[in-house]
């Protein structure tokens, strides 16, 4: 049930961030969702605060050198 809920939430991300979140693992998406909620941000919103949270949880998307270390 929990996986079904998370999978359904994937479609609520703002279009601007979908390309980052498409490759994210379920626990990373959940962490981002929880940080959005904790910081009173809408799940489908777009702002610098949203992007800062995504960068914090998924730094490898913004630094290719980290991608190899993260995905091994």
Image (cartoon, rainbow, N blue to C red):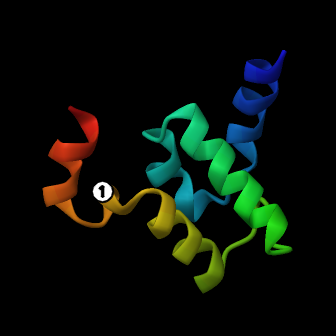
x, y percent for residue 58: 43, 56
**Quick check: 39 above or below 16?**
below
Q: Is residue 60 visible?
A: yes
Residue displayed at 36% across by 62% down: 59
Q: Where does residue 38 sit, x and y in percent of width and height?
A: 82, 67
Q: Is residue 36 left or right of residue 48?
A: right
Residue 10 in the figure: left or right of residue 21: right
Q: Is residue 16 left or right of residue 60?
A: right
Find residue 65 and report its image quarter: bottom left
Q: Is residue 54 above or below residue 10?
A: below
Residue at left offset 58%, top offset 33%: 26
Residue at the limit of the structure toward the top, as seen here: 1
Q: Residue at x 54, y 51 (%)?
A: 18
The picture places residue 43, in percent across and down from the top left corner, at: 78, 59
* Relative side of 63 to 52, left or right: left
| Secondary structure under the numbered disc 1 in the rendered image | helix
Disc 1 designates what residue? 60
- Residue at horizontal 68 percent and vertical 39 percent from the top: 10
Within-10-Å neighbours for mark 1: few <14, some 14–19, many 20+: some
Q: How many marks?
A: 1
């Amino acid at each position: 049930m929990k996986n079904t809920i998370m999978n359904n939430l994937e479609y609520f991300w703002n279009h601007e961030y979908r390309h980052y979140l498409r490759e994210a693992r379920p626990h990373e998406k959940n962490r981002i969702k929880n940080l959005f909620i904790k910081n009173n941000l809408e799940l489908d919103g777009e702002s610098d605060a949203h992007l800062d949270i995504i960068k914090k949880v998924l730094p490898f998307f913004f630094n290719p050198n980290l991608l190899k270390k993260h995905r091994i």
